[in-house]
Amino acid sequence: HFPDARVVRGRVGTRSRRASPSFSVWARRTFAHAHSHATPLQQVASETMMTSRPVSLASRASAAACGTRKRACSVRATRRIPTAHNKPCVTTSASSALGGSTIALDELAADATSGNPLIGITPDRVPMVEAASRGDTPGAGSFNWQKQWYPVAVIDLLDPQKPHPTQLLGVDIVVWRNGDNKWSVFEDKCPHRLAPLSEGRVEDDGTLLCAYHAWRFDDTGACTDMPQANSVEEEERIKNNPRSKASARPSMEAQGLVWAWGEAGPDAKLESAMTPALLVHEIEGVGKSGPAPGGGFRNHWQVRDMPYGWASFFENAIDPAHAVVSHHTLVGDRYDDPAGFQCVVERPMTAEFGFRCALDPAVPPFNTIGKYDAETSYDFQPPTLLKIDWRHEEARFLTSHYCVPTRPGWCRHFVATVAQREQNTSNKVRQHRWFKLNLFTLTSPAWLTHVLGPTFLHQDMVLLHSQERIIARGEGQAMAEKWKEQVFIPTGADKMTVMFYQWFGKHGPVPWAGVGGSQLPPIERDQSKLFDTWEMHTKYCTHCQGALRNTTSLKWLAVAGASAKAVWVVTTLAFAAAAADAAAGPGAEPSLASIINEVPLSAAADVFSVLSLAGTAYGLHGFASMFRTFPFSHAEESIVMEGTAKIGLSNDGPSPYIDFVDNMLFGGDKLTGKTHAGGCECSGCSPHFDGIRSTVLAARKNKQAAKTAVKGAAKPEEAPVSR
């Protein structure tokens, strides 16, 4: 179903805007071409997904493995192996230029002209889409990495009294709060002798002081104090020299994040003002966790430096098939849940705006196999944003991932989720594992969400860190070409990954600063460095630092309590032995029974207290260590992951805890009268919602239309009103 291409409705509040004639012609031709040039894969996909369920890994596996995996064996024994006629069709092409991929070139060519070019695009960026389609923008059809906004830090996690170093596109930068309580971003070098400004101080007057020679700089980068000058005149003359300025980047604050422009320079301020950042309107105006526009709710930002590159992050995040395997027990089961699916293009690929695809159907963890009542879309918008949009008739979860290329082989990952709920529903959505897992994070304290983050991220971190280096073989800038040559893509489940590397092959590589700075470091074999959560997160998170201090204090308090109780128990036993010895008389040895008889009954409680306090101290020590390191191996079972499965968050089914949290956040009249933010992409707000291509959504809309028709037929006709 394609929307009317003649009018493109960009919504800011309640206003709408008509597309330009040239854009309308282009869009109309795009949709007509897509409709008339569908490949066999596209023609078969919808019928297949409506009539047959995906093929589970458990049903395809050999029965020879039953002896070692009883749980998987029981599933294999009960599932029907699909016959050839109802398996998802994947066309192949011997002339494919995609290396090991068997996804046909004609299918990918058709994808390039299918879908709605505006779905998922926020209203403030719609004019950019129109201008790019007309070729009115400089470099239309290409991607400029430097002329973009990048999130670089989470405001709520920063200490405003200190400068904070990070990196962007291979350039060292420093984030600090100036005298106007605004966050500024400089390149991390003093213009005097290039010492790092991040090693300096934020002074009481709101300037940044270089710790080498005490030069000071305001938020524009201008030098305000130079103590080595011989006179006031000399100091003013030197300050007026442009070379005395620190290199300031355009910066802004939005959605609780500090954003920096991709380059400095004389035109940077004007160019940055003309370019909207990749904001998510559903969480606009929300810094910390709490209520979001329209009666929604969002969780805390999580941020972490990851030891693999920008491309590896998106290759992984845009791949739904890996979730239930790599993240076993947290979001699914590696033996029961893997299944085949189709990726249907909702927004065609462009240089400036990426692409958007729907899963048809959305397999686990987004649904249960055989029960598809929710749909999911993946929306990649370069250079930083991936939105995973999960929609159910009773609720919606929008997870926004930002990935920033910091240096070769590393990236910085930000993620937050916003929940939207419908009023007066039957609450069937509470049974969904995706709903339960995401709702749990909405009410967790920031430090708890952060410390549990590695339980998810570390599950595939080693895989991505090693895979990237194996493919690149040191040549990080040739990643897209080498990936295409070496991988084997036999099914359509990897289609979005293929599309991502198509985009990256055309518009990459990442333009790292410096000569020879693009080479990837070798595979890190030291597990203590690879799983170093202190360096990757805790050292720049004020929430986690506070939680670590409190946990450490509680640990030593428990140790002190256990020690004091142990001394008391030993003293009690000594007194009991002395009493028994006195009762035995001179020269006689007291028996063990007589000593025990002298021990007061309270000693047993004291021993229990010693063991309890010692166990508490040990548990707190283990918990505190998670702020510093969290090693993980798929060859071993994890008590944290298994615990998540045991309490029912990673499985479909009822949960009293989720019922309580859902009522607390969305129950009663909490949603009454709440309007969504302008630019919201839910079904009730988006003017492009018909561009979402999902058989689940189509069935739901048909069902709703049928109900409306039945109600309309049952309603008696009203007599015309005279005027």
Image: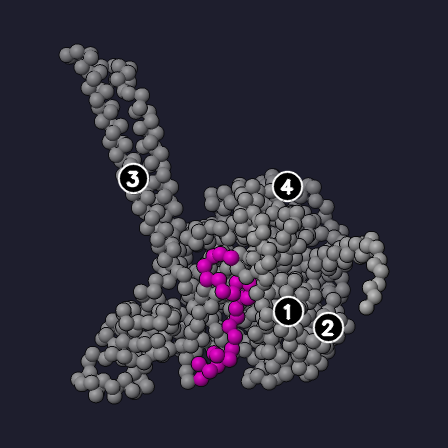
Which region shows up in magenta? Answer: 267-291
User: Circle 4 is placed at which residue position?
Assistant: 73
User: Circle 2 is placed at which residue position?
Assistant: 4
Q: Is tag 3's residue or tag 4's residue first in the polypeptide sequence?
A: 4
Q: CA distance from mark 1 to mark 3?
A: 58 Å
Left or right, residue 425 beside residue 419: right
Asked if 378 appears above or below 54 in the picture, the reply is below
Q: CA distance from mark 3 to mark 4?
A: 47 Å
Q: Are marks 2 and 4 in contact (CB under 8 Å)?
A: no
Other-residue count near label 4 (Cα within 10 Å), few / some / many at <14 / 14–19 / ≥20 = many
Mark 2 belongs to which amino acid? Asp
149, 430: nearer the viewer = 430
> Does dot 2 land on a helix, a strand or a loop?
loop
Frontmost of labels 1 and 2 is 2
Mark 1 belongs to which amino acid? Ile
Across and down, in percent, residue 183 comes to 38, 70
